[in-house]
Amino acid sequence: KAGVTQTPRYLIKTRGQQVTLSCSPISGHRSVSWYQQTPGQGLQFLFEYFSETQRNKGNFPGRFSGRQFSNSRSEMNVSTLELGDSALYLCASSLVPGHSGPQFFGPGTRLTVL
Amino acid sequence: AQTVTQSQPEMSVQEAETVTLSCTYDTSENNYYLFWYKQPPSRQMILVIRQEAYKQQNATENRFSVNFQKAAKSFSLKISDSQLGDTAMYFCAFMSLQNAGGTSYGKLTFGQGTILTVHP
């Protein structure tokens, strides 16, 4: 069974641009959650999607958004990029949301904002 | 708001020995879940072990076990017979659940992580 995949793996953007990251969950998994990992702030929850609807959101500005498609693939978008958005963005998939917690993570997308 | 604290930024252990990673958390919730995740260098993060707060019995997964002290809000991870492949960053995480439409949702709060190095 293929694992969680994320594309692209690396991305370089400049301030003010926007970016879209993609996450394909494990086949059959319907919940996708996103996390930002930085050396200073550590790992922070961005949002979770289930059945094409955002179910939970972390404390991030509205520039961070996402969506989920009918095949459970998810995208996150960051508009008007700032230097502080440079981070490793991880997604994780679960069969369903809830107490099992995310079990499988993708390799991440390394975003660098110049 | 929940907080998770890992007080050991780095630890090291000799191969085949036992090591314990510490984690404390702060919450007013009574029903929640605790996790340990492992992030090896340049590799994907994986779930190591999970503990339900309502269960008194400590979770165990092969060489990994936890010491869950609910009253003290402590959740340590013990790795027995350490192997070179255990070298990684270890994150402790907390999750409480909210119900909506018959489905439970939660968001993970992570600690800052502990870098564990296993020496041959």
Image: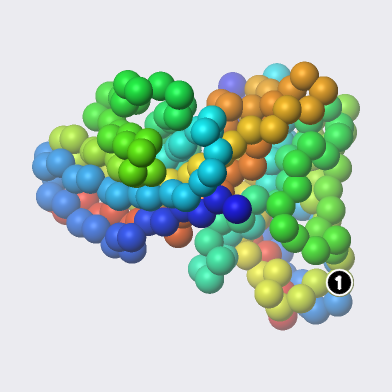
Residue found at x 73% / y 27% = B99
Percent across and percent down for residue A100 are 56, 26
| Chain label for disc 1 | A
Label 1 sits on residue:
A80
| Residue B90 left/right relative to A1 | left
Q: Quadrant of residue B6?
A: bottom left
The type of colouring in the image is rainbow
Percent across and percent down for residue B67 are 28, 35
Percent across and percent down for residue B35 are 45, 37
**Total tally of numbered discs in the picture:** 1
Q: Nearer the viewer, residue A82 or B94?
A: B94
| Residue B6 left/right relative to B15 | right
Instruction: Let me know if residue A26 appears in the view.
Output: no
Instruction: Let me know if residue A43 appears in the view.
Output: yes
Q: Quadrant of residue A56?
A: top right
| Residue A37 left/right relative to A50 | left
> Label 1 crowding class (10 Å Cα cut-off): few <14, some 14-19, many 20+?
few
Residue found at x 71% / y 78% = A83
Q: In the picture shown, does residue B20 fall above or below B5?
A: above
Determine whether the residue tagged by mark 1 lies in a helix, strand or loop.
Answer: loop
Q: Nearer the viewer, residue A85 or B59?
A: B59
Q: Nearer the viewer, residue A18 or B80?
A: B80
Q: What residue type is disc 1 on?
A: Thr
Percent across and percent down for residue A85 are 70, 69
| Residue B108 left/right relative to B68 | right
Residue found at x 24% / y 29% = B63
Residue found at x 28% / y 31% = B65
